[in-house]
Amino acid sequence: MSQMNNNLADNNIHTENIVTINKSDIPNGGMKSYKQDDDSIILITRDEDEFFAFDGKCPHAGADLGTGLRCGSRVVCPWHHATFDNRDGTLLEPVAMRGLTQYQLTDEGESLSVDTSAKMNQNLDNDKLIDTHTIIVGGGGAGFMTANQLRHTGYGGKITLISKENKAPYNRPLLSKAFLAGNMEEDKLLLCGAKWASDNDIDLRLNQTVSEVLPNESTVVITNDSGNSERQTADFLVVATGAEPNIPPITGADLDGVYTLRSMEDAKLIKAASHDQRVVIVGTGFIGMEVASALAQAGTTASITVIGQDDRVMGNIVSKTVSNALIKLHKDNGINFVFNATVNKITKVESKAEHPKHDKTFSQVGGVTLANGEHIDTDIVILGTGVAPRTEVLNEVNDPDGVQVDSHLQLRDGVYALGDIAKASGQMGRMRIEHWRVALQHGMVTAAAILNDDNVNSLEARIPFFWTMQYGKSLRYSGHAASPDNNILLGSPDTLDYIEYYFDDEGEDTRASAASTLGRDKELVAFSELLRRGHAPTRAQINTGFDIIEQAQALSR
């Protein structure tokens, strides 16, 4: 059943908070959204003679959910694939942090009356596991989502969240997508606001480091800024220590003027240091390309040069054709590229400190020297050379490539490892994935495991998804493929309108394991739903003009 997005029809009535809608406008098994004069949106879903009304803006970024896809009981946002139950608005998949606001709806025979002032959502009593204590190590997406979900799904025990950072949990991906570009202020990045912890009765302990995790004892050793240590034992222990930037063995990588981007403090330093400076970015992955895009949009640098080891950008994600389109997009925005190059050395220059009482010299970046001997003058270097999981506190039980956990993120009874450190068992095999949406999924799954809630899907019923924002264009990727080179490309990447499917081999009956898109969001949502259900299209189906949206909806009925 096709989904539609219309302005409020002339034959529908709007009186203050009451909106009257014709029942015949809503397709059975589908949904429809209605934009209001105040820019709000009402979403109506229908199953036979049952109708449900919701706030139709996705709580994550405000997308019109009516332009997304309904597959069975799932309403999927077209932008970032947040997913909600069509009957009560329950959050089924992040990146949204909460479910939909549901409105009171009255059946008037041929029409429906929706009262947008009558909100039906009820907060659960936090009466589960009230005599227990959950300790969460790490204030990133996975740790935050675990705490948030616990509190919003009935957990009544004590929650302690320990973070090395000096601020409440924030939206880390927006550092390179928006903050560096000057499109979003720092306070807007805080997850659920500055008062989130106090509003949810969470003991948020900032500027503290967990130096050791003893999983067999459910115990952590905590060290504060003063060097004082304490041990705490919990009923449930959640370890989400995240990842740290890889620093390649480049001579001069420790000079002043060499930066990585992982935290808010990193972003502030880069933002301040890059003004009127020549910038070199080492690395052509999505972080390197987002930083290039953000700094170009900010318009404050003297120049930006990106250095890559091969001839692609995001080469492990998209095909060469899509990569070339992205390169063109960046070049059109003033980015210079040096491909098939390796940085051997970051050279330094000696500068004198401007101080009336001493004549001190210090070393700072002067340029980079490539393996072929070429030298590029620059003032700052940003390393976008990947990250490594912070597993050292758990190295007695796992290898450095990740903490091996099950599909509920459990390492031991009551002990969980999630986010960037987790090498988790899921539908697509055991893998470690360093993406925001995956971290949030881990938080949802872990909270449900602690509460022993079998109604929440484990990782076996979820798939990876990420997106990258460059120059206001969002490239979205769903699933996981070992290589982008066994592919089928539909559309035109040069006009930023394509979808590309990836396969593990060239067999006609091989099912796609991943897809990426610019501009074909509903098709990617449909692919994601088919992949999740084990029915991803085969190469032969796609080559014969397979209607992926129709198939996703048909299989979900």
Image: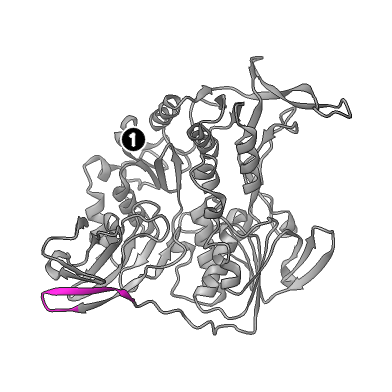
Query: Which residues are drawn in magenta?
Result: 107-118
Instruction: Give coordinates of residue 5: x percent, y percent.
Output: 22, 56
Q: Is residue 552 above or below residue 523?
A: below
Q: Quadrant of the N terminus?
A: bottom left
Instruction: Give coordinates of residue 102: x percent, y percent.
Output: 33, 72
Circle 1 sits in a helix, a strand or a loop, which is it? loop
Front residue of 434/206: it is: 206
Instruction: Give coordinates of residue 220: x percent, y percent.
Output: 75, 67
Residue found 60% across the figure and 40% down from its top: 386
Q: How is the image coloured?
A: one colour
Magenta: main secondary structure equals strand
Is 457 on the left or on the right of 173, as rendered? left
Crowding near the residue tagged with mark 1, few <14, some 14–19, many ≥20 C-alpha atoms within 10 Å = some
Q: Amino acid at mark 1?
A: Leu
Q: Is residue 113 magenta?
A: yes
Instruction: Give coordinates of residue 346: x percent, y percent.
Output: 71, 25
Q: Quadrant of residue 394?
A: bottom right
Front residue of 283/310: it is: 283
Is 312 on the left or on the right of 264, as rendered? left
What residue is shown with label 1? 496
Q: Is residue 103 above or below residue 277?
A: below
Q: Quadrant of the C terminus?
A: bottom left
Q: Quadrant of residue 162?
A: bottom right
